[in-house]
Amino acid sequence: MSALPSRRLADDPCNRSKDDARFFRGWLKRPFVTGAVSPSSRALGRAMARFVPDAAIERGEVVLELGPGTGVVTQMLIERGVREESLVLIEYSAEFCRLLRARFPKATIVEGDAYALEAEAALAGRRIGTVVSSLPLFTKPDAMREALIGKALASVAPGHPFIQFSYALTLPVKPERLGAVVELSPWVKLNLPPARVIVYRRPA
Ligand SMILES: C[S@@+](CC[C@H](N)C(=O)[O-])C[C@H]1O[C@@H](n2cnc3c(N)ncnc32)[C@H](O)[C@@H]1O
């Protein structure tokens, strides 16, 4: 893992409370899109980032993040060692996109709908190594969730992960529907509400 950068978004109480307010406003406007009343904890972001393979980081592969919000998971990916230049973020909210551009100027920020996986132009011919998602999948019908994860898995090489967090006891999609295997993290209790990380992979 690389050295920690000096920027620590969620450790800064000013940022944290401002981000909480931004999130809450987003949730009031579009509860089923924002999907949570406050940003995830650093602990949950770290638990997600742990699943990015070391080799993918060493090779500088693209990490596609869906639903980055105010950037807590993004920051944890960077602290895990992912280069900012390797990050492509797709976020629906224009306000969150403005914030992400200011916070991660070297990352590629796409304002758009992750279900359409509108990343081709931003990828500029680069292959996606890992997909990390915080999308509120359970607000969408089964078929849409399955299509999203299926498309994401098809965009990465076999054995490479689609990493999702969830508060739910059930899986968003049964892995056999995707021809995939699933790995679960322990519950991350330092998050409100507690959540766990679900990793789908096609067999290598
Ligand atoms: C539960 S929040 C997670 C935000 C952040 N990653 C975190 O963990 O704090 C979900 C995020 O996904 C975004 N989102 C929801 N639907 C989306 C879509 N179809 N395309 C892109 N972003 C979407 C929301 O705007 C919100 O920022």
Image: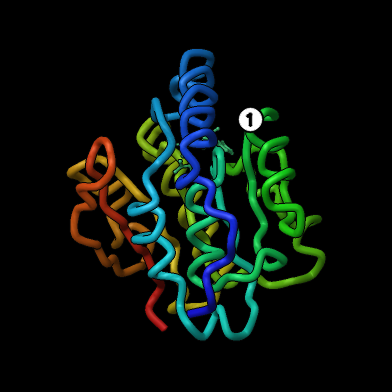
Q: Is mark 1 within 8 Å of ligand 1?
A: yes
Which residue is painted at 35% across and 35% down in the image? 138
Instruction: Indicate left or right for 59 with 190 as reference.
Output: right
* Above or below: residue 111 compared with residue 159: above
Instruction: Indicate left or right for 79 with 89 as reference.
Output: left
Which residue is painted at 51% across and 63% down in the image? 77
Q: Position of residue 81 (x, y in %)?
A: 54, 73
Q: Secondary structure at mark 1?
A: loop
Instruction: Indicate left or right for 84 with 69 as reference.
Output: right
Which residue is painted at 55% across and 39% down in the image? 69
Residue 123 falls in which quadrant of the image?
Answer: bottom right
Residue 12 or residue 45, whichever sits in front? 12
Instruction: Indicate left or right for 38 with 2 as reference.
Output: left
* Above or below: residue 16 compared with residue 80: above
Which residue is painted at 35% across and 63% down in the image? 199
Q: Position of residue 165 (x, y in %)?
A: 35, 50
Q: Position of residue 75 (x, y in %)?
A: 54, 55
Disc 1 packing (10 Å; few <14; some 14–19; many ≥20):
some
Give the residue type at disc 1: Ser
Q: Quadrant of the C terminus?
A: bottom left
Q: Position of residue 55 (x, y in %)?
A: 51, 85
How many discs mark residues in the rendered view? 1
* Above or below: residue 170 compared with residue 132: above
Label 1 belongs to which residue? 93
Residue 45 falls in which quadrant of the image?
Answer: bottom left
